[in-house]
Image (spheres, grey):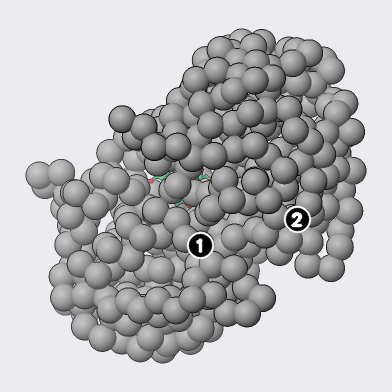
């Protein structure tokens, strides 16, 4: 199995192009199911999850074609066309590899009147139920059956009708499924306590470009006036705020300076203010954010929560950064119950971290030392790469298929700014 080998301790300097956001791409792609016309997505990142989602759409009858990047843009341009829905079943073999497959449930139901999706089950970072997705569809009139590990949603004979969906807790995925279903339901749907993540706004803007009528963008109440049909569109995926934040941590950890080209400030206030509080010099340039660290990292107290608060997807990378802070930090994870799997691995590299229930006490140490490490999820793996960039000696990060799910051309981007990092084949 391939691994990433890093010789740490080099201050990173230069420019890193930021790719399209994985979590926006994974909710924009299923929009193709909502129309028989082509949906063209620009700035799609080259990631394993994007490929897997493309395969899932192919199974459902969506034709896909790929063009290279346009001049001045990174990533790919892909066109998706669901002239007909060939199947309404998302099979276990695909869903088990990628939880985001649940995002075909709403669009298939809305377009074809029925959808059968394998239950995703738990994953490394927690239990991750889908009850909120199902409640949203039921509020629009869908009947839900669970059998043999699959969920089947069926629209009533007269079709789905708008209604009020009031989420008891904030869910990104359930808000996405609710939006993608409501755009083709009859009448008006109000989604209360909707997630406000920038990826939700990206989804709403793409749906609007396809002819949907949605009010309340960026707020926690979205009002959707259903349409009989949507049409094709061309839409560019927003830049990845988590990739941006991850490389900003790399600048801090190595006492370097990185210009993150294409990063968008409005999607990442909590991340940038955390970095600034940790001592980063942050400069806003046209089309880029420059982050400079002077090697002295200040401790922080941070709690993860839904947007606009600090994102759970940055917790592991901040923990790597704070392991070298001058003082003690407190991180609290409120979204997922099992998102500290990087802690034992960071500890093996010399970090001093103690987990107390949902919180982690991080006592800053003088330095980290390279070690062979592995992680069981994407962001945890990135925190180990970051630690490796700052550590003395060699770090080997194993199970890098996690990184390939969410970081486009990771080694190439880091090599270009001076990191000694390479991917090597293993047994
Ligand atoms: N939840 C429920 N019931 C549901 C849905 C969610 O109890 O029906 C719970 C979850 O178990 C969790 C909380 O609600 O405790 C929030 O989960 P949410 O639904 O918001 O997460 P998600 O849609 O499954 C997306 C991202 C995650 C990111 C979270 C939170 C995608 C494809 N995934 O997941 O990204 O951590 O939102 O912001 O958009 C990652 O990129 O590494 C990643 C895990």
Q: Which residue shows up at 54% across the image and 75% down it?
A: 69
Q: Which residue is mark 1?
A: 45
> Which quadrant holds the C terminus?
top left
Q: Residues within 10 Å of mark 1 (few under 14, many from 20)?
A: many
Alpha carbon of mark 1 to alpha carbon of mark 2: how far?
18 Å
Above/below status of 63 relative to 60: below
Left or right of residue 390, residue 340 in this image? left
Q: Which residue shows up at 32% across the image and 57% down it?
A: 52
Above/below status of 354 relative to 288: above
Q: Residue furthest left?
A: 148
What number is the disc on residue 186? none
Q: Which residue shows up at 43% across the image and 48% down it?
A: 405
Q: Which residue is mark 2?
A: 15
Left or right of residue 145, residue 286 in this image? right
Q: Confirm if mark 1 falls within 8 A of ligand 1.
A: no
| Element type where label 1 sits in the image | loop
Lower sequence index among marks 1 and 2: 2
| Element type where label 2 sits in the image | strand
Left or right of residue 77, residue 219 in this image? right
Q: Which residue shows up at 33% across the image and 69% down it?
A: 107
Residue 57 falls in image quadrant: bottom left
Q: Position of residue 289 (x, y in %)?
A: 80, 56
Residue 281 makes an appearance in the image? yes
Q: Position of residue 12 (x, y in %)?
A: 76, 41
Residue 343 makes an appearance in the image? no
Residue 159 falls in image quadrant: bottom left
> Which quadrant holds the N terminus?
top left
Q: Nearer the viewer, residue 298 or 332?
A: 298
């Amino acid at each position: 199995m391939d691994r990433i080998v890093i010789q740490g301790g080099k201050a990173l300097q230069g420019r890193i192009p930021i790719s399209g956001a994985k979590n926006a791409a994974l909710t924009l792609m299923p929009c193709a199911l909502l129309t028989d016309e082509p949906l063209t997505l620009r700035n799609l990142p080259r990631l394993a999850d994007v490929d897997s989602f493309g395969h899932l759409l192919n199974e459902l009858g969506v034709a896909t074609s790929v063009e290279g990047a346009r001049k001045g843009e990174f990533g790919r341009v892909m066109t998706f066309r669901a002239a007909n829905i060939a199947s309404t079943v998302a099979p276990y073999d695909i869903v088990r590899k990628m939880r985001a497959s649940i995002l075909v449930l709403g669009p298939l139901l809305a377009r074809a009147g029925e959808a059968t999706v394998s239950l995703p089950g738990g994953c490394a970072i927690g239990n991750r139920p889908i009850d909120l997705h199902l409640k949203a569809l039921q509020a629009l009139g869908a009947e839900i059956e669970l059998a043999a590990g699959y969920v089947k949603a069926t629209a009533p004979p007269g079709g789905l009708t708008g209604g009020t969906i009031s989420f008891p807790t904030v869910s990104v995925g359930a808000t996405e499924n609710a939006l993608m279903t409501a755009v083709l339901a009859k009448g008006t749907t109000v989604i209360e306590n909707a997630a406000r993540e920038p990826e939700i706004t990206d989804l709403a803007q793409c749906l609007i470009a396809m002819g949907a009528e949605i009010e309340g963008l960026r707020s926690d109440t979205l009002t959707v006036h259903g349409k009989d049909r949507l049409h094709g569109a061309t839409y560019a995926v927003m830049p990845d705020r988590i990739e941006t934040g991850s490389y900003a941590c790399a600048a801090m950890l190595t006492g370097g300076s990185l210009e993150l080209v294409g990063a968008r400030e409005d999607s990442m206030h909590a991340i940038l203010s955390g970095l600034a509080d940790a001592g980063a010099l942050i400069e806003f340039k046209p089309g880029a954010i420059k982050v400079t660290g002077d090697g002295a990292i200040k401790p922080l107290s941070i709690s993860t929560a839904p947007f606009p608060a600090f994102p759970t997807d940055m917790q592991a990378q901040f923990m790597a950064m704070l392991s070298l802070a001058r003082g003690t930090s407190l991180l609290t994870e409120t979204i997922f119950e099992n998102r500290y799997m990087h802690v034992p691995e960071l500890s093996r590299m010399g970090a001093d971290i103690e987990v107390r229930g949902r919180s982690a006490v991080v006592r800053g140490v003088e330095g980290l030392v390279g070690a062979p490490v592995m992680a069981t999820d994407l962001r945890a793996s990135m925190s180990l790469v970051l630690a490796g960039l700052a550590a003395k000696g060699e770090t080997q990060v194993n199970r890098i298929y996690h990184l390939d799910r969410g970081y486009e051309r990771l080694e190439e981007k880091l090599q270009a700014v001076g990191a000694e990092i390479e991917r090597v084949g293993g047994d």
